[in-house]
Image (spheres, helix red, strand yellow):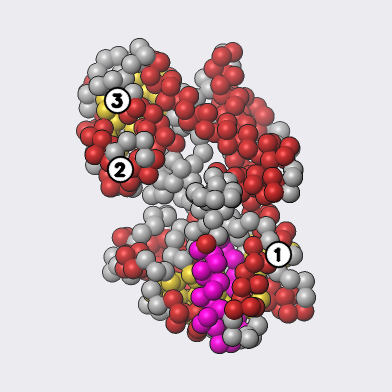
Amino acid sequence: MKINKICCIGAGYVGGPTMAVIAQKCPDLTVTVVDLNQERINAWNDENTDNIPIFEPGLSEVVAETRGKNLFFSSDVEKAIEEAQVIFISVNTPTKTYGKGKGMAADLKYIELCARQIAKVAKDNKIVVEKSTLPVRTAEAIKSILDNTGNGVQFQILSNPEFLAEGTAVSDLLNPDRILIGGDQTPEGLKAINTLVDIYANWVPRDKILTTNVWSSELSKLTANAFLAQRISSINALSELCEKTGADVNEVARAIGMDSRIGPKFLKASVGFGGSCFKKDILNLVYIAKSYGLQQTADYWEQVIIMNDHQKKRFAEGIVKTLYNTVAGKKITFLGWAFKKDTNDTRESAAIYAADDLISEQAAVCVFDPKVSNKKILADLDELQTRTPDKNAQSISSFENPYEACKDAHAIAILTEWDEFTEYDWQKIYESMQKPAFVFDGRNILDKTKLQKIGFVYQGIGS
């Protein structure tokens, strides 16, 4: 099968950047990204590429280089499916909020809709690539739909999970640790695998492109995220012990991280992990384990989530306790709302839950984040349904200037590790605040000694 056109269904955090880099590295391929959300497509097609809907360092430059040449964004899903030889599925797979598996299992309704649309439209053989993070054996369901509802054409289903970290997605795509491709171990399946290998081999060394059966590939993605989240919950569990014993979690992390068997990555104590993947994928793993009757395995992985939720809650409780057991009417300034630096993604951000808890204690929460809008902040809080949207709007506000956000505040809480926070004039901030002036460093990024010399009451995580 000669490949000259590929498409991706889903113009989100995975589909957009992945297809942009493929277009840049494969100039002979026509790459079309489709989405039913016309507003999102319009944003991707904005003349000013700085206004594209996803902020990732380097992404706007890649889009500017390729868009209109061999990279296109469209809402005409059927045309893109019909013309492409390779179709990536990169739609949302949220945790189910209803029925069996509620709160744990992945909701695959969007995946099924994609499969049915591909089956309806396709008139010639296609390679369909799972790019979304999916439960093990989802490919089997997709293949069943395609084979039984299609037009008699042949489909090969591949699993090609993404291993991108938001904030470094472009560099992760350009220089990946590995590319994983799973498919049927039949002659036709192996041929499809090699077709996708050849696309990535335009810029990725072949020894970094791993091929497996489809089930191993699907499970590897869930496992990778579970292991990373486990390390964060582990060090956060120890941070609470450090606070009780007088140990410093940063020193502990440095000491154990120098052990080559452990390594230093993902040992940064914090207010907790967020993002679209970790919690969702672990809950999915828990559900799969339970569905096979593996209760002890399920309990083991569920504890990672329990620990992370506890860390977020105790951060907010620590603010209340330190501020003399009441924050009613007090201005608490959040620096950061995104779940991590260098992204505008707020999904599962610790800031959302900390703000919700403090608002329930009648605090006045103010927010500054360099990439997150007031509209998004309110939408995140409204989604929790703790109180009415009007009440949320009265209880939280955002600023475009960090110094204005901090003025007259009783306390500042660092919720995102934006580099610029370390560069602020903290003397100026201190002078503008209520006294005593508190800093709760939920990301352990500020210089504790420097702030204490200025006069701040400083509290980090695990020290």
| Residue 255 showing in the rendered view | yes
> Callout 2, which amino acid?
Leu
Secondary element type, mark 3: loop
Extreme residue toward the front, this view: 99
Q: Which mark is residue 88?
A: none
Of residue 268 and residue 347, the one placed in the foreground of this image is: 347
Task: Look at the image and give the residue range highlighted in magenta.
Answer: 110-132
Q: Is residue 166 above or below residue 394?
A: below
Of residue 3 and residue 298, the one placed in the foreground of this image is: 298
Verify CB contact (< 8 Å) between mark 2 and mark 3: no
**Relative horizontal placement of residue 452, taking residue 90 as reference (left or right):** left
> Callout 3, which amino acid?
Ala
**Relative horizontal placement of residue 411, taking residue 161 as reference (left or right):** left
- Residue position for label 3: 363
| Residue 165 showing in the rendered view | no
Is 131 covered by the magenta stretch? yes
Tell me where residue 283 appears, x and y as whole percent: 59, 45
Q: Is residue 252 above or below residue 202?
A: above
- Residue position for label 1: 214
Of residue 77 and residue 430, the one placed in the foreground of this image is: 77
